[in-house]
Amino acid sequence: MSDDSVARPRPEAAVALRPAGRGRIEGGFWGARQRVNREVTIPLGGERVRESGGFANLELAARGAGGEHRGKVFADSDVYKWLEAVAWERGRAESDDLARLYKEAADLVAAAQDPDGYLHTYTQLTGRERYSDLASSHELYCAGHLMQAAVAGSRAVGDDTLLRVATRFADHLVKDLPADTLDGHPEIETALAELYRETGARPYLDLAARMVAIRGRELLPLKGHHGPGIRQDRVPLREAVTVEGHAVRAMYLAAGATDVAVETADGDLLAALGRQWRDMVAAKTYLTGGLGSVWYGEQFGGPHELAPETAYCETCAAVGSVQWSWRMLIATGEPAFADLMERTLYNAVLPGISLGGDRFFYVNALRVRAGANPDDRRAAARGRQDWYGTACCPPNVMRLLSSLGHYLATRDGEGIQLHLYANGAVRAGDVLLEVETDYPWDGRVEIVVRETPDRPWTLALRIPGWADGAGADGQSAGPGGYHRVRRTWRSGDRVSLDLAVRPRLTAAVPRLDVARGQAAVERGPLVYCLEQVDHPGVIVDDLCLASPDLSDGAPLTGLPAEVVPVIARGRAHVHREEDGGFPYRTAATPLESAHEGPVDLTFVPYYAWANRGAGPMTIWTPMH
Ligand code: FUB
Ligand code: ZN
C-alpha cells in the first residue's frame, strides 16, 4: 500500500478530502475481478492491441520512414490505456512478465516520439499537418492517455520511461501548440493536471485551465450534422447547468475541469460542476449509473430520455463517470459522489466485461427484446465481443480495475473515510485498517484497526443511500451519509457495520415514462435483471411481477456460486393471435389482462448477464 493515488491533489489544492492512497483488495468480490483482470484480460489486451496494429504503428513511427497506419486515428490511445493498466498492476504486485511487457511497450513509445516531443502515429505516418483537424484527429486525446499512463508508471513503480516522453510532449504543447487550441475529444485537460501534480510543472496546469476556460465558445469547427454541443463547445462550463453531447467526452472534460478547479481554488467553477453533476444524476442517468441514451453521436439525451432498449451507456462513459465523481468527492467530501461511484462500478462498468474477463460490451442496453436486431457489433443483442474496431472500452475497464484500490478511502484532518467496501486493507498515514467482508452479497463489514497513533481520530463509514435499516455496532446508521466514530483507537479495535443488504423493488419517477408501471429489482448496490435463460417456456418480454415479495434464491448453474439470485412470483401475459397483427387497439377498450399460469421469476445481477449466452433481458419488469 502506498500513496500513489489516482488524482492526487497538490498540497495547496482546495480539497475537502485527500486520497488515502492505494488500498489492498484481497479476495472477495473485487479481488476476484482484479485477479481475472491481471491473469486474463491484461495479457489478452496486449495481444489484441498487437493484432489491431497498435504496436506496429509505433514501430513504423519509430523508423521515421512513413508507412500505412492501422486502425482508428486514436489507435495509440489503446496502447496507452493498456500500458496504464500494466503500470497499476505492477504497483499492486511486481512481476517479471509485467515489467517486461511494460518496458518493451514503453521503449517503443519513446522511440516513436519526434525529436521535438510530438507523438501521434496517425499524423506521423500519414504526413498530415499537425493540429490541422483537431475536431476529429484525437491528437491531444492520445497525448492525454499517454500522460496518464506515464503518471501511473511513475507513481506505481517509480518507472519514469513514459514520464520522460510525456513531459517532453507536454513541454512541446506548452511551447508550440497554437494559442486557444482545443481537441474535439477532451482528455488532455485531466491528464495535464495530473502531470502537473506529478512533476510540479505549473505550465501544464495553466494549459489545462486555459483549455477548460475557452471551451464552450464554438471554437471547434462543426462536423457533419452535429452542432457544437456534441463536443461540449456550446456553453462555457462555468455557465452550463447540465451535461450534454458525447457522454465520454463530457465525463473526461468534467473530470479535468474538476482537477483544474481544485488546483486553482476556483470555487465558482467547482460550483458549476456540482450543478451539472446533480442535473446529470437527476435526469440523465440510468438506474445502472450508465450514461448516454442516444446512439447518434454517442450522446446524452434530453432530461428523462432514458429508454432502456436503446440505451447507449458506453462502458467508457461509466469509467469516466467514476473518475469525475471521485474528483468531486475529494473536492467536496459529499457522500452522494461515492454513492454514484459505487452504483456505476457495479452496474455500468462491470457489465462491460465478461465474468471470464475475455469478452466485452461497448454498449450496455438495459433491455433486449426477443428477436432484437444484432446487426451492429455494439448491439447488446449480439452479446459481448472479443474486441472492437473502436476498442476504447476494454482497456478502460482494465485500467480502472487495476487502480480500483485507490478509490476506497480518503483522509482529512479529522481522520479516515471509507467510501467503498472491499475485503482487504487500507493505509492512511500511520493508520492501518483491515476490512473483512463478503459485500455485496452480505451487508456485514468488519473494520479492524491494526495500526493507530495514540490520539483520537474519526473513522467515517459511508452508509449508501439505499441502505435503509443499516446499523453500526448495534446503533442505527442513517442512509446517505457517514457513520462517524471518534475515539483514541487501540490496535485490535473493531467496528461492525451492517448495510442491510436485501432485495428491494425500485420504481422510476413519473417523468421517466418509459419505466412507468414497472419496477426494477435491486439488492444492496447491485441492479438485477431478468434473463431469458432462466425462464424456459416463456418469453421475457411477456413477464410481469405478480407480487412485491422478493427473496434470495439458490445459486444458479453457470454463474459463480457466490452470486445470489432474487426470486419473485410472476406471470406471463398471453400474446394472442390478434396481438400479432397490428399491435394496437382502441384505448377506450378496458385493458384485459390475459395471463398464462404463474411463473417463478429469477433475477440475476445485471453485471452478470449474457455470460450464459445472449438473449432477451430486462431490468424493468411490468407490475401488471
Ligand atoms: O473517440 C474516441 C472514443 O471512441 C470515444 O471516447 C468513444 O466514445 C468512441 O467513440
Ligand atoms: Zn469506449
Image (cartoon, rainbow, N blue to C red):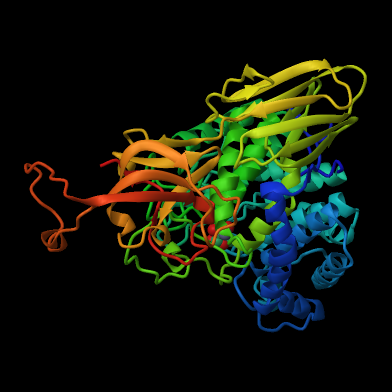
Q: In the rendering, at what x and y percent does residue 151 appear?
A: 81, 52
For the point 63% across and 28% down, the residue is 498
Would residue 171 be seen by someone viewing this image from the given angle? no
For the point 52% across and 25% down, the residue is 468
- State whether residue 342 is above or below residue 335: below
Front residue (pair 375, 453) = 453
For the point 37% across and 55% down, the residue is 309
Would residue 498 be seen by someone viewing this image from the given angle? yes
Q: In the rendering, at what x and y percent does residue 351 appear?
A: 54, 55
- State whether residue 492 is above or below residue 108: above
Position of residue 571 in the picture relative to residue 16 (left or right): left
Q: In the rendering, at what x and y percent does residue 342 appear?
A: 60, 40
Front residue (pair 151, 227) = 151
- State whether residue 296 is above or below residue 22: below
Q: Quadrant of the C terminus?
A: top left
Q: Quadrant of the N terminus?
A: top right
Q: How many marks?
A: 0
Q: Quadrant of ligand 2?
A: bottom right
Position of residue 372 in the picture relative to residue 92 (left or right): left
Rendered image quadrant of residue 371: bottom left
